Image (cartoon, grey):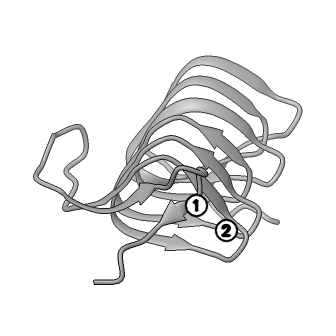
């Protein structure tokens, strides 16, 4: 997969421990442990990425592994190869077939860094798979 033009790229051989923050789109395919804060930008977690971090971004697209809570004011996309362990709060959520998630999901109007009223839409079942309500 190729990063979007104009994105900052963290390659698959790079390891970062600590806080990553910025004001531009970020494509990461390496290892990150800590926190990621991109409140006005898009974070793309590439297929080789191993991320153990809490994430706050405008939009998040995940192809690789992410362990941590994700908060997005806009949209979160879990692509076919995505593996997420953590809670999700987002305005919109897209999950492709074969993507996996273990955690709670809330769809809500999300202001970056600000708590807001939310509407729970899914809870993990006892087996760890995502159980969506039909109504």
Relative depth, front residue between 12 and 121? 121
Query: In this rendering, would 86 be left or right of 64?
Result: left
Q: Contact (CB < 8 A) between labels 1 and 2? A: yes
The residue that appears at 81% across and 28% down in the rendered structure is 14
Relative depth, front residue between 57 and 77? 77
Q: Which residue is mark 2?
A: 79
Structural crowding at the residue carrying mark 2, measured as other residues with C-alpha within 10 Å and reported as few (<14), some (14–19) or many (≥20): some
The residue that appears at 23% across and 37% down in the rendered structure is 113
Q: Which residue is mark 1?
A: 61
Measured along the vertical axis of the image, is residue 28 above or below residue 123? Answer: above
Question: Which callout, 1 or 2, points at the residue further toward the start of the chain?
Answer: 1
> Residue 45 appears at what percent x and percent y?
66, 50
Residue farthest toward the right in the current orientation of the protein: 13
> Residue 22 appears at what percent x and percent y?
45, 36
Q: Secondary structure at mark 1?
A: strand
The residue that appears at 67% across and 65% down in the rendered structure is 5
Instruction: Kindly report the distance in space between the C-alpha atoms of the residues bearing marks 1 and 2.
Output: 7 Å
Query: In this rendering, would 89 be left or right of 126?
Result: left
Relative depth, front residue between 84 and 19? 84
Measured along the vertical axis of the image, is residue 35 above or below residue 101? Answer: above
């Amino acid at each position: 997969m190729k990063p979007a033009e104009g994105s900052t790229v963290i390659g698959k051989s790079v390891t970062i421990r600590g806080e990553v923050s910025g004001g531009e789109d970020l494509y990461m395919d390496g290892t990150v442990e800590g926190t990621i804060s991109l409140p006005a930008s898009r974070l793309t977690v590439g297929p080789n990425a191993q991320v153990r971090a809490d994430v706050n971004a405008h939009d998040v697209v995940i192809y690789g592994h992410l362990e941590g809570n994700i908060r997005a004011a806009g949209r979160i996309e879990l692509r076919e190869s995505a593996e997420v362990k953590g809670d999700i709060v987002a305005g919109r959520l897209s999950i492709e077939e074969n993507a996996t998630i273990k955690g709670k999901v809330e769809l809500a109007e999300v202001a970056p860094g600000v708590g807001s009223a939310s509407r729970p839409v899914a809870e993990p079942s006892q087996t760890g798979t995502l159980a969506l309500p039909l109504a």
